[in-house]
Amino acid sequence: MRPDSVLAESSEGLASLAAPYASALFAIAVERDALDRTEQGLGAVLALTAGSPDLGRLIRSPVVARADQARAMAAVLEAMGAEPLVRNFIGVLARNRRLGALPAIVRRFRALVAERRGEVEAVAEAAIDLDDATTNRIRDALAAALGRRVALRTEVVPDLLGGLVVRVGSIRVDGSLRTQLQSLAHAMKGAA
C-alpha cells in the first residue's frame, strides 16, 4: 500500500492546505539545519500510517477528539524515536485537525527539499521492489530527459502487475502492465 494513498484526500483542497504547513516546516528545518532528518522522519511517519490501518483510521476519524489524536500520535512518535521537530509538527497538525493532510504536506515538503538541492522529485512505482541498478538507470534516464538532477523515490504497488509508473510533478507516465491490459480489453470491446 502506498503511504501517500492511505489517507483519503481531495487533491485540490489538500494541496492548497498542504502548502503553508509544508513551507513553514521547511523554513524551520532549514533554520535548524535539519532538512534530511525531518524528511526522513516524515517518511517514517507516512510508512507507519500506511502499515497500520488502525492508526490510519485514528488520525482520519472526525469522532476522535483532537487531544486524543495528539496524545496517540505523541506516544507513537516517542516510541519510534522521532525527531523533536517532527513530533512537534505532527502535534500541531493534530491540534489543528490536519492529520488527514499529512500525505499532501509531505509531498510538498519533499518537493521543496528537492528544489533546494537543485533536483526535481520523481516517484517510480513498480509491482516489485526495484534493485539499486534498476533505480539508478531510471534516475539517470530521467535526469537526461529533464536536464536536471533527480531525487527518485520508489514505491511498491503490487496492483500494477508489472511495468512502471513514473510521476514527476504533475506529469505521469504509465507503462504498467495493468494499464496495458486495460487498454487491450477496451480495444477488443470496440472491435467486437
Image (tube, rainbow, N blue to C red):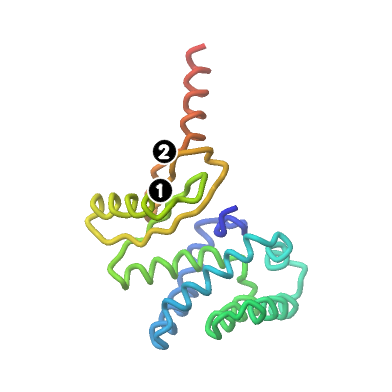
Classify residue 155 as left or right of residue 33.
right
Q: Which residue lies furthest to the top in this view?
A: 192
Position of residue 178 relative to residue 42, above or below, is above
Q: In the image, residue 25 lies at what x, y percent?
A: 47, 79
Which residue occupies the foreground of this view, 57 or 62? Answer: 57
- Label 2 and label 1: CA atoms lie apart by 8 Å
Position of residue 128 relative to residue 69, above or below, is above
Asked where in the image residue 97 lies, by quadrant, the reply is bottom right
- Determine the secondary structure under disc 1: strand
Q: Name the residue under label 1.
A: 166
Mark 2 touches mark 1? (CB < 8 Å): yes
Which residue occupies the foreground of this view, 21 or 37? Answer: 37
Q: In the image, residue 102 lies at what x, y percent?
A: 56, 67
Position of residue 169 relative to residue 161, above or below, is below
- Determine the secondary structure under disc 2: strand
Q: Residue at x 38, y 70 (%)?
A: 112
Q: Mark 2 points at which residue?
A: 175
Q: Badge 1: few (under 14), some or many (20 or more) residues near its Cα, within 10 Å?
A: many
Q: Which residue is drawn at 52% across and 68% down?
A: 43
Q: Which amino acid does label 2 sit on?
A: Gly
Asked where in the image residue 132 lies, by quadrant, the reply is bottom left
Position of residue 85 relative to residue 149, above or below, is below
Q: Which residue is drawn at 60% across and 81% down?
A: 81
Q: Which residue is drawn at 42% across and 88% down?
A: 32
Q: In the image, residue 24 lies at what x, y percent?
A: 45, 79
Classify residue 173 as left or right of residue 55.
left
Question: Mark 2 or mark 1, which has the lower sequence index?
Answer: 1
Q: Badge 2: few (under 14), some or many (20 or more) residues near its Cα, within 10 Å?
A: some
Q: In the image, residue 136 lies at what x, y percent?
A: 34, 54
Q: Which amino acid does label 1 sit on?
A: Val
Which residue occupies the foreground of this view, 67 or 157? Answer: 157
